[in-house]
Amino acid sequence: MTLAPNVSAQALSGLARVDPSQSHAAQRGQTVTLKLALSQPVPYRLYTLDAPRRLVLDFREVDWAGVSKEIFAKASTLTEVRFGGFRPGWSRLVADLDAPFALLSSQMSRDAQSGRALLTVVLKKTSAEAFAAQAGPPKGDVWPDPVPTPQQKETGRILVVLDPGHGGIDPGASRKGQTEKDLMLTFAREVAQELKRLPNVDVLLTRNDDSFVSLERRVALAHQAGADLFLSLHADALSEGRAHGATVHTLAQDATDEASALLAERHDRADMLSGTDLSGQDDVVADVLLDLARQETQPRTERLAKAIVGGLKLKGAPLNRRPYRAAAFSVLKAADIPSILLEIGFLSSDRDFQNIINAEWRRAMAEGIRDGIQAWIISDEAIRRVVRQ
Ligand SMILES: [Zn+2]
């Protein structure tokens, strides 16, 4: 079921587009049928996952422009559908299932005259046990385009890893057609420009396009590249609507407050639902070693948080009334790299939203981050020199 047999021999060119007018989902009793119309056939694979139950559909990259999840609304079993870029060259659709509906059949047919393709997926209700037995990602998570490993940094230089939050199938927060994933990619590029002005500083982005990168992979990238500091950039929404201004988060097992706990949990959930990597549970022995490394890193991380807040303040950034917070953010779990997560503002706040979509405001914030990081590099080097003596 990984490749539609009628597709593999064809020369595929251009990006396939989803035709929303011919795509829909329907439910009749124990059966759910999902139809996706594409401008041309593409290789695809599909499978179900358990806990929570969902259907995952991977395609060679397709263009989702103009597609809304409303087209799947007629099948009530599909409680939530998300789709978008996954890895470079690949797209993904994930549909949450409210009951155990297993894969019955899938077929991609091609219209000989128009060259268009229609993917039909049929799910059938089954028992929870049978669903669990069938569920699971394909053996050996083989992707034709492996994500490139970053080059090791040069000695004597400081490597800053910037992490634009969300991406691809996981849009993060959204408001008035603007998404957190796009805004943060733009902002990360702007911050990178500013940081490159500093002597001795190199910058690496965990993603440079609209693809999904798992939280674990973001941390792994920072390790592989030999990062000196890790900065994750976000602009989430909080439904309570009382969150305004920039907030710097560090890692802690116990969250400082409910809102931060909610943010960390939401990021983990989006990651889990969008990706397939279900491993990554640290064992107890590893935990002890990691804790020791974290103890050493923690004061450096705290100084980094203060330096960035200081840099932002000097640029007149609106700060949250409690700008320092902590929670169990998975993306901050690199034990030996000072890592912070910056909510530059909240898309749910009117004022913050207007700021974040304003290029001039973002430039001032990027300069503030640059100045904060520069101050941190100087003080960190000085303190470490004293400690080493
Ligand atoms: Zn976010």
Image (spheres, helix red, strand yellow):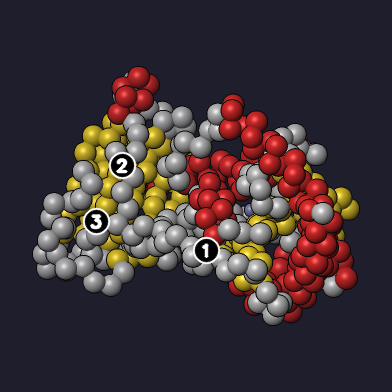
For disc 1, the marked residue is 152
Quarter that holds the N terminus = top left
Q: Name the amino acid, label 2.
A: Gly
* Residue 143: % across, % down: 32, 53
Residue drawn at 32 percent across, 24 percent down: 133
Tag 1 secondary structure: loop
The picture places residue 248, in percent across and down from the top left corner, at 77, 54
Mark found first going from the N terminus, 1 or 2: 2
User: Where residue 197 sits in the image (x, y, percent)?
Assistant: 69, 80
Can residue 73 be seen here? Answer: no
SS label for mark 3 = loop
Q: Give whichever of discs 3 and 2 has the lower sequence position.
A: 3
Q: Is residue 312 above or below residue 294?
A: below
Residue 137, picture quadrant: top left
Instruction: Give me the residue at 46% from left, 37% from top.
Output: 278
Indicate which label's residue lies in the foreground, 1 or 2: 1
Mark 3 lies on residue:
43
Measure how far apart labels 1 and 2 are at the Cα level. 27 Å
Looking at the picture, tell me which residue is in the foreground, 380 or 120: 380
Amino acid type, mark 3: Pro
Q: Is residue 251 left or right of residue 40?
A: right
